[in-house]
Amino acid sequence: MHNTDSNKVIFHSKEDIGGGYYLQKGEHILQADTKSIYSDINEVLELYNLKKYIDNDLYLKSWSTDDIANFKTKATEYGNVIGQFMATIYDSNVVDLYENILQEYIHSFWELVNNQSTFKRISKTKFTTIITNEPHLIHEILIHKKLVDHYDNEIKNFLMTYPQSAEILLSIYEVQHNFTKNQKLLPKSLSIEEKETIISNYLDSNDVNYNYLELIQNAKTRNDFKISDKTRLKAKRLHKSETEKVFVNNGGLKFGVSISFPENSIQIKDMYVDENLIAHYSFSLDFIRQNNDPYSLYRNFKDLFEYVDRHNRINLVSKTSQMSVFERIIGVHSQNEYRFGTAFSLSEMASYAQILGYNRVLAKLCISLESILHFVFTTAFQEKYNFASNAHFSIPTAPNSNFEKVRLLAPEFESILKQYKLYVEDKAIDLELLQISSAPSAIKDIPSLNNNKYIYFNEDNEEMLLCSNLIFSDQTLLASVEPFKNKQYNTFFDLLANEEGNVKFSNYEEYQKPQLQYLIDKGFISVDNNEIIQVSNAVRLLIFNDLYNNEYASFYHYPIDFQVEVTRMKDDNIVFFERSLFSKPEQSYFNYFLNKSEFTNGLDLRNSYLHGTQASPNEAQKHEYAYFTYLKLLFLTMLKIEDDLLISIIND
């Protein structure tokens, strides 16, 4: 067990806001004369941490130019002291020295052992002794390449028996890290087969972390990391059984949806959430009956169910802005998964229940969803937008089971995408050319008729990214200021929008003012003679808000003054344009359902039915879900095509 000392100087990183605190602790050391001999390893390691501050040009504001010059000289002297001391470490004394190192300096010690090649004087036997005595030390060792290479076999042998080795492997290959971390490395001698053995043994152990089971099940196959189908199935079954235990023992978080189509309803549509977190949606049956032509019934997916917003962006996509801070940072998540939270899950439940309930309502009117899709693509688009007259869409017949219908509908979905792609490229659909091409069309490759269709924030512009976070993030400190603290505004934008003309710069604490000044310098806000904070460019701020909340914007749905401002923002390298039928978030949404090209947790509906790996024909509920999900994606596709056609006509 290593002792600790809270008074010691520690260097965490150049960006760490606690640097000044540690420099104050170490100032007396910098001011003192450098000793000729140091016998205490912790004293040497403290000099090493102090040297890092000076080498990174981190100083106290109270230091003069002469002080800084003097301390730089001291840092050079510390380098000599550190080198001389590390040269005295040998196989004979390393264990005793290491046991005396403070907990705070374990990282510094192994960093120096790695960087100064001290490991060459430490035998593999002694290294094994150290790591066996402190197994958790492996997490530190694996971030140092020279150590991993030198002690290759010793580390491999350790990992084969260490209970947490599977979690280490997954942290390297799968886990998404929300904060910057040192990348762990693995010994080259650890084979692909041995890595899977580690994973399989982990699943058989009594100490499995539930959060890692889904990562194993959906792990991406790589050249140096592969998990067999048998191991994936083992993880899947264990995940299922553990999930059932959680809900049986703890109840879990329960929420749901209720869909109704009442007669004699005063409102065309309504929604409320009850005390049991059930979202109740109701849609007027009379309205549907009275507007029962195919095109009106199709438009209900926009006007009633709100599958798309007023800018014809798909409302159902997962958005980071809709996830709580806990959903964003808590838990173990794959870097390759489609991330979503409760809002997305509720939206998916609602949209599925809506199309399922709507299908039953239409069946009583002797109308099918498939016939509506057929009419829209082959008749309505031609009449309204002069779309290709030979566009075609084959309807699965009613007597077929959902299992059979989804296998018929899947290729029709592909055909619609290919037909529209040909139409954009040639302003016509050459059916013979369509038949020649057998390769599937990736969602991202379906073009738009309109240039500069979607607007995206340029996340490489770090200054504007910082401004956006200061204004719109729910983690900003600028939303809290007197006399409005009790109103608990989530963001600085909410504060300014609701308290316009009343927020005073002078009411902010001193630690908050540098952030305000940054926004002033970047032209987002200003301060008038009465100390009132004013928005400098309301149009730009609203565009930023739209991009923050939705992750993209539709250029042609903006009014002219917004389009002009967006063009300026493009010239300022704040945003960029792209031309495609689906936006990037929409592409990801489709890919999540249809394939695993982008996400390891994708439902893979397209490939499973194409390759015959779908559920058994007897599992009717799963095939019903797949079929109505395909129908939902088709209606979304029609809404996106119509939006594209309409924009093209308006801009001609």
Image (cartoon, helix red, strand yellow):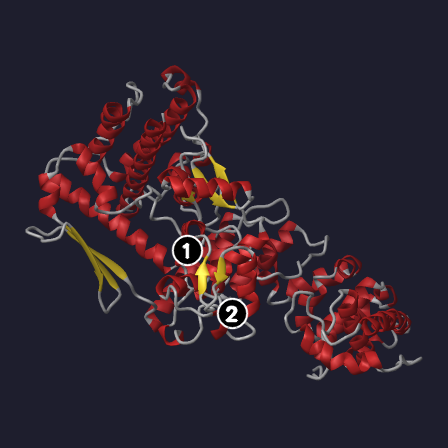
The residue singled out by tag 2 in the image is 206
Residue 272 vs residue 431, the one in the foreground: 272
Instruction: Tell me which residue sits at (38%, 72%) in the image.
Output: 488
Q: Determine which quarter of the picture holds residue 16.
A: bottom right
Q: Determine which quarter of the picture holds residue 594.
A: top left
Mark 1 residue type: Phe
Instruction: Tell me which residue sits at (69%, 75%) in the image.
Output: 20
Residues at marks 1 and 2, CA–CA distance in whole angstroms: 29 Å
Q: Determine which quarter of the picture holds residue 117.
A: bottom right
Give the image location of residue 69, x and y in percent.
85, 70
Residue 464 in the image: above or below residue 2:
above
> From this viewpoint, which residue is outermost toward the front?
529
Residue 104 in the image: above or below residue 119:
below
Mark positioned earlier in the residue sequence (1 or 2) = 2
Q: Is residue 443 left or right of residue 516?
A: left
Residue mark closest to the camera, 1 vs 2: 1
Residue 472 vs residue 16, the one in the foreground: 472
Give the image location of residue 264, x and y in percent.
6, 51
The residue singled out by tag 1 in the image is 340
